Every structure is written in structure tokens, then in C-alpha cells.
Image (cartoon, rainbow, N blue to C red):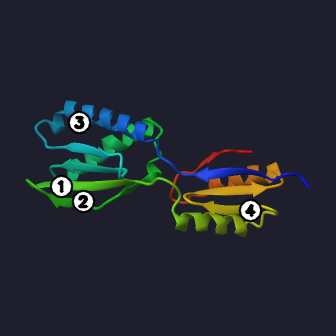
Amino acid sequence: MPPASSFDVTSTVDLQEVDNAINQARKEVGQRYDFKGSPAAIEFKKDDSTLTLVAEDAFKMDQLWDILQTRLVRRNVPVKNLKLGEIEQAANSTVRRTVTLQQGIPSDAAREIIKYLKDHKLKKVQATIQADQLRISSPSKDELQEVMHLLRDHDFGIALQFGNYR
């Protein structure tokens, strides 16, 4: 029997790239005419993986989010892994929004991925949940390639990365 080949499916965000994108967005906000004198700010807490956006009103909040999102896309940060919070009132008649960075595959998304693979009835493909990632294994490397293709084509609400292919 041939040895089983496998690969890992993860969903991570490079925090250094997020920090670089935030610095670029802060610089752009500081230079834009429509933000002159505005209390717009972007705060990044690496330990909780959260961003806090502060702006004058909902319109400027949308503009601030648009600037940040553009910078994140340019730095290849998966925007699917950002969970937007609600716009809430803050001090000094400003508004605040918290954005959470999704690190790892949530358990409900992992179960959805496994169910999706089982629905396609791929022979001898095993999927196991390992903490915040999935390990897909099969004796056939061709089937693993097919699994990668299926997962890339379907939207699970998070960005998937494939690694550790053996």
C-alpha cells in the first residue's frame, strides 16, 4: 500500500503585513484634504488581533475603512479574514468600529469544509481537524490536487492557504 500523502489547510493573516498596511493608511489619512482636522485614527492591537477605527461620522468611517481595505489588499492580506463590527458612538461625538482578524479556521467552517468534501464523494480522502487547521490526506496525490481545486473554487467565508504538502 502506498504511503499516504497529505497537506494542511490553514487560514492566517500576516500581522506584520497588517501593521505595514495600517502605517500606509495612516500616512494617507494624514495627507488627504477631507481628513484635515478630523480625529480619524486606526489603532492595532497585535495581541488581540483587533483593529479599532475612529472617525467623525459614519461617512468618514466608510472612507477610512475603504482606505485601510485598499492598503490591505495591496499588501496581499486576505480581507475575507477581517470581521467588521458595528459602528458605535464614542467620546467627543465620534464613532468607533472594531475589526477582528480571523486567525485559524473556526470549528464551524472546518466542519463545513469536511462536509463539502464528503458530499463530493472523493475516494480515500480523509480530513481531520487539528486545532485551528485541517489536515487532508489520501494515498493518491491526484485526489489531493482535486481537493485543492475544489476548495479554491468554493467560498467558505475565509481565505484558505495550503501548505505542508507531502
Label 2 close to label 1 by CB (< 8 Å): yes
Which SS class for mark 2? loop
Q: Residue drawn at (37%, 50%), measured in percent from left and top?
A: 49
Does residue 46 lie above or below 86 as drawn? above
Local packing at callout 3 (Cα closer than 10 Å; few below 14, some 14-19, many 20+) is: many
User: Left of 40 or right of it: where is 51?
Assistant: right
* Residue 65, image x, y percentages: 30, 47
Nearer to us: label 4 or label 3: 4
**Labels 4 and 3: the sequence-earlier one:** 3
Q: Position of residue 97 (x, y in %)?
A: 26, 55
Question: Which mark, residue 87?
Answer: 2
- Few, some or many residues within 10 Å of mark 4 (<14, 14–19, 20+): some
Q: Which mark is residue 29?
A: 3
Identity of the residue drawn at 31% across and 40% down: 67
Label 4 vs 1, first from the N-terminus: 1
Seen in the image, is 38 located left or right of residue 131?
left
Report the mark closest to the observer, 4 or 1.
Answer: 4
Question: Is the Cβ of the residue at disc 2 closer than 8 Å to that at disc 4?
Answer: no
What residue did someone put label 1 on?
95
Q: Amino acid at mark 1?
A: Val
Query: Residue type at mark 3?
Result: Val
Q: Seen in the image, is 161 located left or right of residue 76?
A: right
In terms of secondary structure, where does tag 1 sit? Answer: strand
Q: CA distance from mark 2 to mark 1?
A: 6 Å
Q: Which residue is mark 4?
A: 126
- For label 2, count other residues whose C-alpha is less than 10 Å away and answer few (under 14), some (14-19) or many (20+): some
